[in-house]
Amino acid sequence: MPNLIMILEDDVSLRRAVERLLSVSGFDTRSFASAEEPDVLESASSACCLILDVQLPGLSGPAFYETLRPPRPPAVFVTAFDNPATREAVRRAGPHALLIKPFLGHALVAAVREAIRGLP
């Protein structure tokens, strides 16, 4: 699916809000509460962009991203914990956007569109 965005976010309210925002912005979404859910790897590999929470129960967003086989889709990481360790974890995962919660909806859509624009 060329416009599929996979969302990995454990906060159910935020996950639903992001799904609605992306849907009205013209994207299809698949969402998960944790990296251990069934079909999460399949969805990640078929997505054109990932939205990954940095702090998740179990495998973190950056750690999950690093488990994906190249070529990996671009990712937009989100976190409520803006600190040097978080920034370093995202930096190690690759050159991706990092949004700090709470973020504005238009900032998320812009980050997703920018990430997709860099695809070959």
Image (cartoon, rainbow, N blue to C red):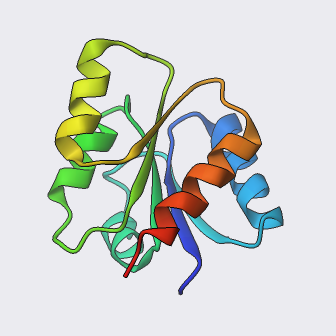
User: Would residue 78 be seen by someone viewing this image from the given angle?
Assistant: yes
In the rendering, at what x and y percent does residue 15 appear? Answer: 63, 45
Q: Residue at x 40, y 80 (%)?
A: 46
> Vertical placement of 112 versus 48: above or below?
above
**Residue 65 spot, x, y in % from top left:** 26, 53
Residue 97 is situated, as x and y percent measured from the top left of the image, at: 44, 43
Q: Nearer the viewer, residue 117 or 77?
A: 117
In this view, the residue in front, 41 or 78, is: 78
Q: Residue at x 64, y 46 (%)?
A: 108
- Write the residue at 37% across / 33% down: 54
In the image, 35: left or right of 1? left
The answer to whether residue 59 is visible is no
Q: Is residue 48 left or right of residue 35?
A: right
Above or below, 98 against 38 in this view is above
Q: Residue at x 33, y 50 (%)?
A: 35
Is 25 located above or below residue 102 in the figure?
below
